[in-house]
Amino acid sequence: MTDTPQPEHPFDVDAFLSRPLVARVATVNASGAPTVRPVWFLREGGVLWWITGEYAVMARHLERDPRTAVVVDTCDLERHEFLQVIMRGVAEVVPFDPALSRRKLRRYLGDDETTWHPDFRYFADDARLVRFVPERTVVKDLSKSFS
């Protein structure tokens, strides 16, 4: 088995996407216009996951049209760090997995679940997950150096 060469990126994408950053997810609404929502996400095995449910319009958008775009970026003005990961692909709503969901929430809220707000400790009966598989990824480092 031959290892497939990985594309060169200007920064460590795996480390970047393991940070507790917010992703902006674009889906297509019923009238064909883009709709953007911020989400907390977990990346495992090249797949992005986030929580949704019957309460969310995103699930209906994805059932109608699974094409999705995701942007994760930074805008650190003090350090002049401007990193971007832009992905396009297909997303689908899948059954809920409490263990995966807790792993995602620990990234943002910490390991001690007793300190979490109850809204994050107990999942709604209609909770689902979105599974996003990127087909195209663009990575940019637009950081500035002021030496």
Image: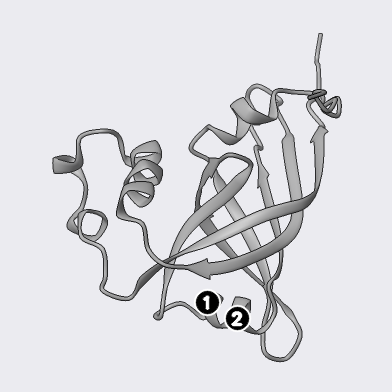
Q: Nearer the viewer, residue 129 or 57?
A: 129
Check disc 1 and report its element: helix, strand or loop: helix
Q: Which dot marks residue 59?
A: 1
Q: In the drawing, does residue 15 fall left or right of residue 141?
A: left
Residue 4 image-quadrant placement = top right
Q: In the picture, which quadrant includes the N terminus? A: top right
Residue denoted by label 2: 63
What residue is rendered at 46% in x and 77% in y?
56
Q: Which dot marks residue 103?
A: none
Q: Residue furthest top?
A: 147
Please identify, in this view, whether the residue under mark 1 or under mark 2 is nearer the observer.
2
As shown in the figure, which amino acid type bears the numbered disc 1? Answer: Ala
Q: Nearer the viewer, residue 93 or 26?
A: 93
Residue 108 image-quadrant placement = top left
Q: In the drawing, does residue 95 fall left or right of residue 134?
A: left
What residue is rendered at 72% in x and 91% in y?
31
Check disc 2 and report its element: helix, strand or loop: helix
Q: Where does residue 39 sit, x and y in percent of width and height?
A: 51, 56
Q: In the picture, which quadrant includes the C terminus? A: top right
Q: Nearer the viewer, residue 14 or 2?
A: 2
Residues packed near mark 2 inside 10 Å, few (<14), some (14 to 19) or many (20 plus): few
Above or below 50: residue 73:
above
What residue is rendered at 74% in x and 39% in y?
84
Q: Where does residue 107 sit, x and y in percent of width and height?
A: 40, 37
